[in-house]
Image (cartoon, rainbow, N blue to C red):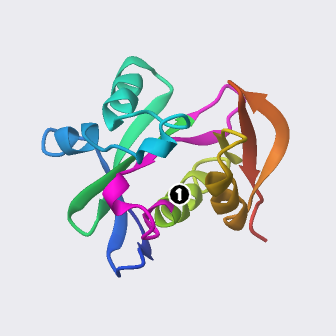
């Protein structure tokens, strides 16, 4: 379990846990709001399948206290950078600070891995909510584009 000590706005502790026999169905059923489906998968199941078929990505269940509320995955690129991808917070849980707490939990954990790698993510240029969230958490566009998404890297903390 990855526990950064972050709470959502309802005071629930947000933790990231391995996807296992007990939670995979709940993670697979996570679905975004309808207006977000052009930016993210329609169900967490797509990301679970991607991480199970890829050697790059590792899926994690996002919990608020003891309830699965989302999915996020992380991976390592050829250049050694560590990536946050496939973040999907269930529609019923949005607007509660779960996405923010997820990134605040995962990004420092990735940055602290061996070699203190840069932490990156990407988002669609039209996804202004994601851009605002990531910018507020210290991610800045690198100028690179990957699969029609803007690549952003978190500024190192002093």
For this orientation, the residue located farthest to the left is: 22
Looking at the picture, how far across and down is residue 18, in whole percent?
A: 30, 46
Quadrant of the snapshot with the C terminus: bottom right
For this orientation, the residue located farthest to the top is: 53
Is residue 133 rendered to the left or right of residue 109? Answer: right
For this orientation, the residue located farthest to the right is: 143
What element does badge 1 sit on? helix
Quadrant of the snapshot with the N terminus: bottom left
Q: Residue at x 34, y 43 (%)?
A: 31
Looking at the picture, how far across and down is residue 134, in whole percent?
A: 66, 57
Q: Which quadrant holds residue 112?
A: bottom right
Q: Residue at x 74, y 39 (%)?
A: 151
Q: Is residue 6 above or below residue 77?
A: below
Looking at the picture, how far across and down is residue 42, in whole percent?
A: 39, 34
Q: Nearer the viewer, residue 91 or 4?
A: 91
Is 33 colored magenta in this rendering? no
Q: Residue at x 44, y 33 (%)?
A: 41
Q: Which residue is the site of mark 1?
A: 109
Q: Nearer the viewer, residue 107 or 134?
A: 134
Q: Which residues are magenta?
A: 76-99
How many dots with numbers? 1
Q: Residue at x 35, y 52 (%)?
A: 90
| Mark 1 surroundings: few (<14), some (14-19) or many (≥20) residues within 10 A | some
Q: Is residue 24 above or below residue 106?
A: above
Is 90 colored magenta in this rendering? yes
Is residue 57 rendered to the left or right of residue 158? Answer: left
Is residue 140 rendered to the left or right of residue 98? Answer: right
Looking at the picture, how far across and down is residue 149, in whole percent?
A: 70, 33
Is residue 1 visible in the rendered image? The answer is no
């Amino acid at each position: 379990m990855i526990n950064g000590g972050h709470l959502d706005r309802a005071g629930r502790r947000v933790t990231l846990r391995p996807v296992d026999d007990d939670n995979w169905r709940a993670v697979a059923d996570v679905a975004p709001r309808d207006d977000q489906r052009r930016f993210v998968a329609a169900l967490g199941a797509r990301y679970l399948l991607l991480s199970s078929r890829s050697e790059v990505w590792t899926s994690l269940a996002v919990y608020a206290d003891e309830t699965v509320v989302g999915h996020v995955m992380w991976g390592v690129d050829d250049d050694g950078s560590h990536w946050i991808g496939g973040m999907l917070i269930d529609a019923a849980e949005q607007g509660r600070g779960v996405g923010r707490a997820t990134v605040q939990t995962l990004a420092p954990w990735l940055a602290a891995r061996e070699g203190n790698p840069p932490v990156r993510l990407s988002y669609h240029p039209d996804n202004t909510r994601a851009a605002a969230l990531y910018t507020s958490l210290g991610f800045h566009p690198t100028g690179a584009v990957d699969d029609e998404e803007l690549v952003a890297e978190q500024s190192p903390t002093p």
